[in-house]
Image (cartoon, coloured by chain):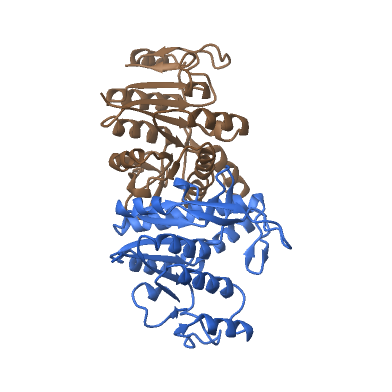
Chain colours: A brown, B blue
Amino acid sequence: MKTKLTIVKVGGVIINDNLLFEEFMKSFSKINENKIIVHGGGIIASNYMIRLGIIPKMVNGRRITDSETLDVAIMTYAGLVNKKIVSNLQKLNCNSIGLSGADGNLIKSKIRKVNKINYGFVGDIEKINDQFLLNLLNSNLTPTICSITHDKNGQLLNTNADTIASDTAIAMSKHYNVTLKYCFDKSGLLMDQNTNTSIKKNLTKKEFKKLVENKIISGGMIPKLENCFKALENGVNNIYVGNIDIINTIDNCTKITL
Amino acid sequence: MKTKLTIVKVGGVIINDNLLFEEFMKSFSKINENKIIVHGGGIIASNYMIRLGIIPKMVNGRRITDSETLDVAIMTYAGLVNKKIVSNLQKLNCNSIGLSGADGNLIKSKIRKVNKINYGFVGDIEKINDQFLLNLLNSNLTPTICSITHDKNGQLLNTNADTIASDTAIAMSKHYNVTLKYCFDKSGLLMDQNTNTSIKKNLTKKEFKKLVENKIISGGMIPKLENCFKALENGVNNIYVGNIDIINTIDNCTKITL
């Protein structure tokens, strides 16, 4: 039987809130099995962009990344946020190592083709170096992966953190029994956006399609959940979506199933 | 006999000049033996600080690091500069991994005591995790270490890159025959600051003391060279100071000896 691996994607709202962040760090550090964090840090990047006089541009919840925006993304994701997480885990005796996709050639991506929209320096993932992650986990290290990848030709690329989490989960399911947890500011998939108790406890692919049709699921939740189904179809064992409580308990969140 | 390890400290002037940087990357990537890069990035940090409305404060060539300055240091050193080096090495088929002192608990430091000057969030090195570096080198990885360390209590600290280079060289001399190269914008130790050909080819500790007394060596060169002698006294085999040519050849630079 494969040993367990938990991959947690942590959202920017949690990273940006000192109390939530501290609580998240404590819970995560206590996970006994192998574990990986994946993070972005969009809110922090946007704040620095505004201070630097760069106007954040978003289309359908995705960031348009010009050269200056890319630099701020690299600085905040791979620098400020990544090292904040790693140093806090070290404090909690969790021996973490921060990684971008360039480090150890962890995530090779290619720049997104210009179709209707030119996303700029945004990368679509081509390959996750699962052997490298396996070696780190076998050395009792906890990888903290930020949402910056590279094209192996010297270009760093801004890459969606949800997708990095699900593609990493898929790649690692060769070696482990993988549980993927998307941790954000809501208790799960809400049927009524204004009521935090309206959690859908279980979401199947069929239900998902209907809820999208009926516009109950919309915006950024659509690609997030599509990533989940792709992961389940490609070897990932369990997926949960919810707030920071899901690190400890899965009683009050959304379980995604096929 | 111990195998060889080359540690190169690269200066901000080289990192900030696209042509010099490219040439440096090419030369470094061709070193056949085990290798490590150490870097800061002070010029880039200062540029961002000015854009963010933070006034850089220096005393005797050392940065006073308040909380905001620390964030910019983390962003530029551990983020922008570190990932620029790593992604460029990946392009050149050198499998590099970027590290701050928090990653893998690589460099534990303590905040500098307030004496005459309060340097703020500046760290003095306590311990280098040589076993972690050894494991990475044995996995054919090339560490790229930035000048950010941590106190193992959640606090990141700005730390002098020259000192990180010499302390890393000392720690690794247990395992390797270590050559340390300080690579900056001058050809070596100049006897006349205005003449790039006035290189002192060899500098002993005795000569160093005299040249400091006579004020021919001054400013930031003093702690840089003090680091060199400390390293030689603690097991490091060879130390050279010069421009990017010293990666390939040691014909035209300053060799430091006891």
Return the x and y of residue B3 as percentages of the image width and height.
30, 64
- Residue at 40% across / 65% down in the picture? B7
The answer to whether A94 is drawn above or below residue B92 in the figure is above
Res. A167 image quadrant: top left
Q: Which residue does the image show at 52% across and 45% down from the upper left?
A: A76
The quarter of the picture where residue B33 lies is bottom left
> Residue shown at 46%/45% (left/top)?
A65
Which of the pair B104/B70 is nearer the observer? B104
Q: Where A214 falls versus A80 (above or below)?
A: above
Q: Which of A9/A160 is in front? A: A9
Q: Residue furthest right?
A: B116
Please state if B25 lies on the left or on the right of B151 as rendered: left
Q: Give whichever of A200, B220 is nearer the camera.
A: B220
Residue at image point 67% right, 54% down: B120
> How many numbered marks are there?
0
Residue B94 position in % (x across, y down): 31, 57
Q: Measured from the top left, where is residue A218 in percent x and y? A: 46, 22
Residue B235: image location, x then y, percent: 42, 68
